[in-house]
Amino acid sequence: MCTSLTYEAKTHTFFLARTMDFGVKLEGRPVAIPRNYVWERQNGKEIKTRYGFVGTGRKLDGYFFADGVNEFGLSVAELYHPNEATYHDSKKPGKLNLAPHEFIMWVMGENKSIAEIKENIGGVRLINKKVSLLDDVPPLHYIITDSTGESIVIETEDKELVIKENPVGVMTNSPKFEWHLTNLNNFLSLKPTNVKNRQVGELTLHPFGQGSGTFGLPGGFTSPERFVRTVYMKHLIKQAADSTEAVNTILKILNGVTIPKGVNIKDDGLDDYTQYRAVMDASNKIYYFNPYDTNSIFAVKLTEELLNAVEPTEFLFEEELQIQFMNC
């Protein structure tokens, strides 16, 4: 399970961010895919990307990605959508037939903007194909933003891809996206200021302390709770002045939905925890990466050197806690 959000700094710099919450160790790392890279789909057919991109990926039979930003700022993240996502069982002639986990490669490699996705998505068909890492067909949906700040969610309904406008800039997991929007109506009383004293007969009731306006804010790790909590934080947190401050602000929001090991155990005994957090700067084409076992933030900027490389570029990192002693 995962949480994602869009964000805008005062400089009109736009971002997409996500937590990667999963039980199976993904061992992903930042990978830059150059322009005109040829990759092989699960059906054995090859496809050449038009545009370069960077995101968290892993190479098995070929590269697969969970998120990323391309050279035009188009940014995407795929999240689990269990009991909701449905796919076709067979290919259709004349369509680009993709496995669900391959769709993200098409989004970043073939499109400059959300406007282009809306024009081109009719030619794409998702089919039931397993990803080798999981030996299963992952049920996915997708959140996308671009350099204009527009945000959409793409889900499947009756096996067909459907684009949904995202007015709050947040996405988590199941149920369907519109359910989450409707559910927000249950939390209209939430506010950053304290509730007022109230007289009940001869008794004066008063808040116990600061934060009484947030009473009822969901605190668990279910998808609906994380959705509400992220919407509240995103739309009330102080707006960042610039891109650097925005990365810090976004990570503060994600802190509220970051899952540590041991507190969210799956039925099979695996830890469902936040393996990494990512922030994608759609305006400056920078990918920020913060893995679980370190407080360091690693960054990759999409440069012409990376975009014109012959092969993908993988970025290694040391996942260790950085502590700065102040007296020695």
Image (tube, helix red, strand yellow):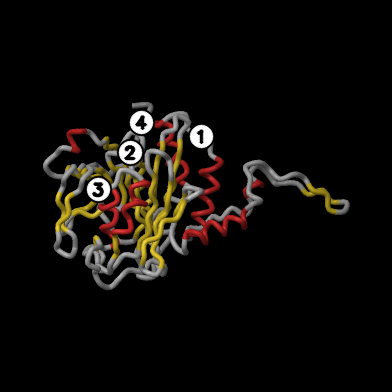
The amino acid sitting under disc 4 is Phe
Q: CA distance from mark 2 to mark 3?
A: 29 Å
Nearer the viewer's eye, disc 3 or disc 1?
Answer: 3
Determine the residue located farthest toward the bottom in the rendered image. 89
Q: Is residue 271 visible?
A: no
Local crowd at mark 4 within 10 Å, few (<14), some, or many (≥20)?
few
Picture quarter with the C terminus: top left
Nearer the viewer's eye, disc 3 or disc 4?
Answer: 3
Q: Badges 3 and 4: C-beta atoms under 8 Å apart?
A: no
Q: Badges 3 and 1: C-beta atoms under 8 Å apart?
A: no
Determine the residue located farthest toward the right in the rendered image. 202
Q: Secondary structure at mark 3?
A: helix
Q: Which mark is residue 239?
A: 1
The amino acid sitting under disc 3 is Gly
Picture quarter with the N terminus: bottom left
Residue 288 at what x, y percent from top left? 32, 40
Residue for badge 2: 296
Q: Is residue 87 visible?
A: yes
Residue for badge 4: 325
Nearer the viewer's eye, disc 2 or disc 3?
Answer: 3
Q: CA distance from mark 2 to mark 1?
A: 23 Å
